[in-house]
Every structure is written in C-alpha cells, then in structure tokens.
C-alpha cells in the first residue's frame, strides 16, 4: 500500500488543489490530505473552519478514483517537531507532496521522500487571489470546483469574509 501526504490550508480549496490531487491519485494507492492551520478560522487570511474545509475537499473529490483521508492538523509553532506531529495525526505514508519550501525542508530533514508537483495556474489559483476577488466583488466561482461553490454558498462564506474584513 503506497500512501501520499498532501497538506494545505485550503482557504478555500480551489482548482489548483484539485489538479494536484488528481495528479497524486495516479501515483499512490491512497491520499492523506492534511488541513494545515486547522485551529484558525474567522480571519481574513483564514476565514473557514477546519470542518468547512473538510466539507469542501470531500465534496470536490467525491468522484476521485483513489481513496483519501482528510485530517485536520493544528499548528504547534515548533518547526523542528512539526513533522513528528503530522505523522502522529495521520495514517502512515511514504511520500509527502508539496511545493512549499518550508514543508519540503522539514520533511526531507525527517528522512521522508518529498515530491514537488507542478503548480497549476498558480498566478490565479491561490486562496489569496480567491479571497481578494470575493472581497472586491469580482468573479471567483470559476477558480474553485463547483461543489466548493455550493459549500461556500451554504456556509455564507463570502458574507463572512466581507464581515470579518470590515473596520470598526
């Protein structure tokens, strides 16, 4: 059994994440998806709860032909111990898939194989850009899978983001 690990904040989950996970699914038997900074929500940079992000990912990947697990992972604020923390929260895995330089460094230092999948349309497909468009009233729906659009409407995600971005 070959398992791969992929981590992100998924604020929100978007088409870039979808592309990377579809690529990883062709290389492993199972995927473990770590929701990083799981303790954060209701902030402009982190507006969605871990549970809402689980819902986005689970619905977006419903047709994926590779079994997957979604695991919320809280920050521990100690980079030297972070990989051990991740491994304690997740099923066993052999390979970490990431393009984040810090994640790559930490997993390599821990002796875990790291692969960096190509990023898909990175200039537009980022949580930062999607949140910016939501705040600016610009179209954002085409940047996320349709199941994520439905989740964000269900939880009133755009309205929450607009509210928490307001100044008092």
Image (cartoon, rainbow, N blue to C red):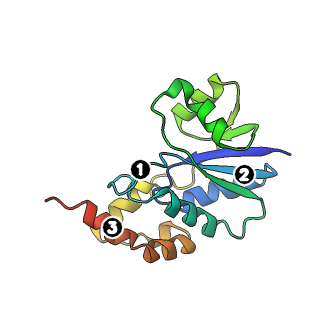
Q: Residues within 10 Å of mark 3 (few under 14, many from 20)?
A: some
Marks 1/2: CA distance?
Answer: 23 Å
Residue at the image position 53 percent from the left and 70 percent from the top: 148
Marks 2/3: CA distance?
Answer: 30 Å
Q: Residues within 10 Å of mark 2 (few under 14, many from 20)?
A: many
Relative to 114, 151 lies left or right = left
- Residue underneath mark 2: 31
- Residue underneath mark 1: 40
Q: Position of residue 104 (x, y in %)?
A: 59, 32
Q: Earlier in the sequence, mark 1 or mark 2?
A: 2
Label disc, if present, on residue 115 of the rendered structure: none
Marks 3/1: CA distance?
Answer: 14 Å
Secondary structure under tag 3 reads: helix
Q: Earlier in the sequence, mark 2 or mark 3?
A: 2
Relative to 128, 64 lies left or right = right
Please identify the residue farthest to the left as the structure is shown: 168
Q: Earlier in the sequence, mark 3 or mark 1?
A: 1
Camera-nearest residue between 127 and 37: 37
When asked about the image quadrant of residue 103, the answer is top right
Secondary structure under tag 1 reads: loop
As drawn, 115 above or below 66: above
Q: How many numbered marks, from 0 up?
A: 3
**Of the residues tagged 2 and 3, which is closer to the observer?**
3
Q: Position of residue 77 (x, y in %)?
A: 45, 32
Residue at the image position 45 percent from the left and 56 percent from the top: 11
């Amino acid at each position: 059994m070959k398992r791969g690990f992929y981590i992100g904040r998924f604020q929100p989950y978007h088409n870039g994440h979808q592309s990377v996970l579809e690529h990883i699914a062709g290389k492993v038997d199972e995927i473990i998806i770590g929701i990083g900074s799981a303790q954060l929500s209701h902030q402009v940079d982190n507006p969605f709860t871990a549970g809402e992000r689980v819902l986005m990912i689970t619905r977006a990947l419903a047709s994926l032909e590779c079994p997957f697990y979604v695991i919320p992972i809280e920050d521990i604020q100690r980079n030297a111990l972070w990989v051990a923390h991740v491994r304690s929260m997740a099923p066993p895995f052999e390979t970490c898939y990431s393009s984040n330089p810090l994640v790559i460094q930490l997993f390599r230092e821990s002796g875990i194989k790291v692969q960096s999948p190509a990023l898909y349309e990175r200039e537009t497909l980022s949580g930062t850009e999607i949140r910016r468009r939501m705040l600016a009233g610009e179209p954002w729906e085409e940047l996320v899978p349709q199941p994520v659009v439905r989740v964000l409407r269900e939880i009133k995600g755009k309205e929450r983001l607009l509210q928490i971005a307001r100044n008092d």
